[in-house]
Image (cartoon, rainbow, N blue to C red):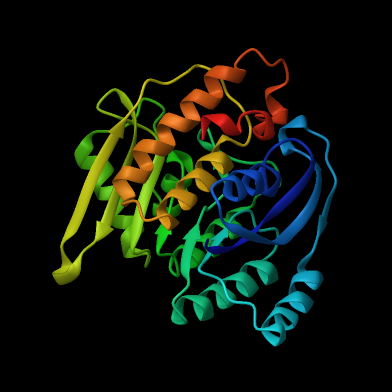
């Protein structure tokens, strides 16, 4: 059993963020702690929402945990809501990594070629710094383009272009990087790269058949399944292959649900993990 800290938002209505990740990682056999970055009424694409930042709570909680001697095998970060918060989390993750904790960064900022509602260009700059302390970062294609200052093209890219983008993510400081929901050589896939000893970079591609259904929170589901598998000893490529299979099955089972903003009801689908 690994001790995992999730730093992400808690959404009152929808299986996204922390709400989606907790049951998955617990089902995989891990002990999960959570540090909310904000309380959010509902997913932002409803158009109307309320957000209460929890930076003060975070600032007060971390020294308490230090006093109590809490230790984590891994920390997984998600949505940030302010510059102070982003810097607090970056500094904390840097200290954890120096102590041997694995740092996984999901740079949640946008999708479909645009930023999410309420996300600013300044947050993109701060997320670049966050990626710099990551053992692994896994942006979607839009987020990878934002992080690497690459124009977004809905039609996708070539394998050589994907490799250059992966190299640019590694250049930010991440030890390994994925680009999820990518379109490479006219195929839907996840592409990955890891820095190896001697300056060598290993790369891979996992191809999948895209299901034309857009659920909110599938990125959080992907993150949780992936991190759980990695902490259970699987290689990065093995973990990505298995995660893609799980996410596709989850989407397929729930594709008829009318409100995709609410995400996938994870607790009813743990048998697919």
- The image quarter in which residue 124 lies: bottom right
Whether residue 13 can be seen here: yes
Q: Is residue 35 above or below residue 143?
A: below
Q: Residue at x 54, y 73 (%)?
A: 93
* Residue found farthest to the top: 256
Whether residue 151 can be seen here: no
Q: Residue at x 49, y 31 (%)?
A: 247
Front residue of 126/25: it is 25
* Residue found farthest to the bottom: 67
- In the shown orientation, is residue 29 left or right of residue 267? left
Q: Position of residue 141 (x, y in %)?
A: 43, 39
- In the shown orientation, is residue 30 left or right of residue 138? right
Q: Residue at x 65, y 34 (%)?
A: 266
- In the shown orientation, is residue 239 left or right of residue 13? left
Q: Is residue 19 above or below residue 212?
A: below
Q: Position of residue 163 (x, y in %)?
A: 24, 46
Q: Position of residue 202 (x, y in %)?
A: 19, 53
Callout count: 0
- In the shown orientation, is residue 142 left or right of residue 183? right
Q: Position of residue 168 (x, y in %)?
A: 31, 56
Q: Residue at x 52, y 63 (%)?
A: 2
Front residue of 179/146: it is 179
């Amino acid at each position: 059993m690994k001790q995992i800290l999730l730093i992400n938002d808690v959404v009152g209505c929808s299986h996204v963020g922390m709400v989606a990740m907790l049951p998955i990682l617990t089902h995989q056999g891990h002990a999960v702690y959570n540090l909310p970055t904000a309380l959010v009424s509902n997913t932002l694409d409803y158009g109307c929402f309320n957000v209460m930042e929890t930076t003060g709570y975070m600032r007060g909680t971390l020294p308490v945990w230090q006093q109590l001697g809490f230790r984590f095998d891994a920390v997984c970060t998600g949505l940030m809501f302010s510059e102070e918060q982003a810097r607090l989390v970056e500094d904390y993750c840097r200290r954890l990594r120096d102590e041997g904790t694995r740092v996984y960064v999901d740079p949640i900022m946008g999708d479909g070629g645009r930023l999410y509602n309420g996300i600013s260009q300044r947050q993109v700059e701060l997320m670049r710094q966050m990626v710099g302390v990551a053992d692994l970062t896994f942006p979607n294609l839009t987020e990878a383009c934002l992080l690497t200052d690459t124009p977004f093209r809905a039609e996708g890219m070539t394998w050589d272009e994907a490799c250059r983008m992966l190299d640019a993510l590694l250049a930010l400081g991440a030890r390994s990087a994925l680009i999820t929901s990518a379109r490479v050589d006219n195929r839907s896939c996840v592409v990955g790269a890891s820095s190896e000893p001697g300056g060598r970079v290993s790369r891979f591609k996992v191809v999948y058949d895209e299901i034309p259904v857009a659920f909110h929170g599938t990125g959080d589901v992907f993150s949780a399944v992936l991190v759980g598998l990695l902490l259970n000893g699987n290689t990065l490529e093995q973990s990505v292959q298995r995660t893609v299979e799980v996410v596709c099955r989850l989407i397929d089972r729930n594709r008829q649900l009318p409100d995709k903003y609410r995400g996938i009801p994870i607790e009813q689908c743990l048998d697919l993990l």
